[in-house]
Image (tube, rainbow, N blue to C red):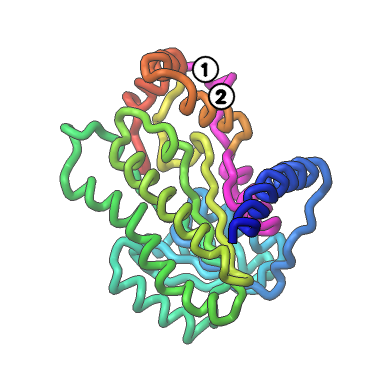
Amino acid sequence: MMWKWLGALLLFPVQMVYLVVKAAVCLVLPPKLRDLSQENVLITGGGRGIGRHLAREFARRGARKIILWGRTEKCLKETTEEIRMMGTECHYFICDVGNREEVYRQAKAVREKVGDITILVNNAAVVHGKSLMDSDDDALLKSQHINTLGQFWTTKAFLPRMLELQNGHIVCLNSVLALSAIPGAIDYCTSKASSFAFMESLTLGLLDCPGVNATTVLPFHTSTEMFQGMRIRFPSLFPPLKPETVARRTVEAVQTNQAFLLLPWTMHVLVILKSILPQAALEEIHKFSGSYTCMNTFKGRT
């Protein structure tokens, strides 16, 4: 037993070096992309914003079927028609992911009408955009129900069949605000931090589940209607991401089985700074960059 323990202890640093070198090589060499031609993709919040761009990107890359969930039928119908014009089979279902019973009911309807879902993209989200004391209690609950609990319900609805098939992928469109919160979006930051913990736990839990994987995407501020009015101090240095860029990088992360993706790459610096700098220094960074007051002009989706 002692020799076995010593052997594992000596092998561990070798494994760490190998994995780091392997990751570095993968950054240089073009990765092999997963074939999507047999995949049925369900995107929550798929009618507009990043969700619509995700539907386009999956269609461009050859997904077999695309299923859109959302709360606004007009947007869902428009996106569905666009995807069908691209030559990809597409369906939509009206579903509020914050409503557990509705999620389970619509998941059953999807399986009966379309078939098994092999890629689930949890994209639906809302932001209240106010301080804690100015926030409406119902709006705060809505953020947590849709942004966090909704992922519990959708994952529970589709993951069991993925495990049976040994083929599946759970994707979460999160936010860098899960790692570095800002004032004025306390509901959104809290829900995204909870969502990140959910995905981190889920990703580790799937290590012994062959054929089933997870991807968490953490983008910087993206130029969509949801965060309309948000302003940072140096937009030329830190321009908002384009939703089509986020969609493209997300689908690539699925095809290369990347567990966590920060967008842009400079956000890795933010994570490092948060782990080494004192709180007072971090506060000064927030004030200097303008993130301390960026939600003062927030309007949100009209």
Taking the view exactly as shown, the residue that stands out farthest to the front is 2
Residue at (74, 67) in percent of width and height: 35
Q: Is residue 172 above or below residue 102?
A: above
Instruction: Tell me the distance, in whole angstroms, between the alpha carbons under discs 1 and 2.
Output: 6 Å
Q: Residue at x 70, y 60 (%)?
A: 60
Tell me: 218 left or right of 18. left
Q: Is residue 220 left or right of residue 18?
A: left
Q: Position of residue 263 (x, y in %)?
A: 58, 38
Q: Which residue is depicted at the point 41% across and 29% down? A: 230
**Marker count (numbered):** 2
For the question of whether residue 57 can be seen, the reply is: no
User: In what element is the residue under mark 2?
Assistant: loop
The span picked out in magenta is 233-262
With 57 as the anchor, is 96 left or right in this view? left
Q: Which residue position holds label 1?
A: 234
The reply to whether residue 49 is in sight is yes
* Vertical relation: 133 (above or below) 164: above
Amino acid type at image mark 2:
Phe
Asked where in the image residue 41 lies, by quadrant, the reply is bottom right
Residue at the extreme right of the image, as rendered: 29
